[in-house]
Amino acid sequence: MKKILLSALLVLASLSGAQAATGGIAWDKAPNKTNDLAALQNGAKLFVNYCLNCHSAAFMRFNRLKDIGLTDQQIKDNLLFTTDKVGETMKSAIDPRQAKEWFGANPPDLTVISRSRSAAGQGTGADYLYTYLRTYYVDDSKATGWNNLAFPNVGMPHVLWELQGKRAPVYATEMVHGHETQVLKGWEQLSPGKLTPVQYDQAVGDLVSYLQWMAEPSQNTRVRVGVWVLLFLCVMTFITWRLNASYWKNIK
């Protein structure tokens, strides 16, 4: 049961992303590490260990992880927990009926989760995920014992709490437009986690970058090819222009 709770990452889900976007705090800017193979590999490890037991990524195959520098043998030895074939898709190990009983709904597929959570004026889906995973706090009034500043009254417990530790927000009272308002000033660390705050932020950045990459594995290749195509077109345009000028220069 502990393993299942730890792997129930990102039940953001079907319960109104709009509420999460409008009811919480401003989103922090997520680091973009989709070109950093070491970060993507660490993100893949976190995803498989903390997400895949409950969440599927049904549009991604394990062998696609070779695109981020892993070999078939490394994938087999370290990342295959739900199947024994690297060609299989990333399907969760949880029974859908049990998931619905425990969480009230089936955990959503995470293949394109980083592209589906965005809001005008707030940021990208990656920014939301990065903020969401870093703003859990202890709340004894909730059944799970947790709440979240980016998604107030979230029904999902903090699955990464062992890495981050237990925290509580620190507020200060300020006058805003003539009214007293509680403003977040920082965090109080109630108990330490396995990682320091800086290490935890880096780990979440790796995980979010992996989710970004998984949503569109060919995005970096597409950008690189696009740059070369544009350069080629610029060169050919110049050559065509000069040939055209040479051809017509003696014609009156």
Image (tube, rainbow, N blue to C red):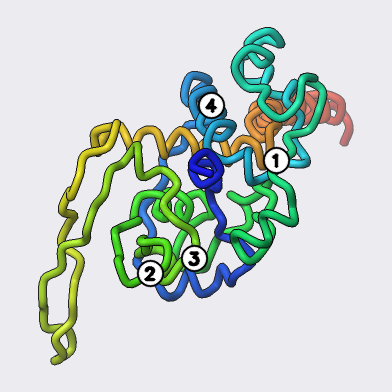
Residue 39 shows up from this direction: yes
Check whether the beta carbons of the residues at disc 2 and disc 3 lie within 8 A of each other.
no
Q: Residue at x 35, y 39 (%)?
A: 162
Q: Is residue 228 left or right of residue 142?
A: right
Which of discs 2 and 4 lies nearer the camera? The answer is 2
Per the image, label 1 sits on a secondary structure element best described as loop
CA–CA distance in space, label 2 to label 3: 8 Å
Residue 238 shows up from this direction: no
Q: Label 3: which residue?
A: 155
Residue type at mark 1 is: Ser
Which of discs 1 and 4 lies nearer the camera? The answer is 1
Residue 168 or 143: which is nearer the viewer?
143
CA–CA distance in space, label 1 to label 4: 15 Å
Q: Earlier in the sequence, mark 4 or mark 3?
A: 4
CA–CA distance in space, label 1 to label 3: 20 Å
Check whether the beta carbons of the residues at disc 2 and disc 4 lie within 8 A of each other.
no
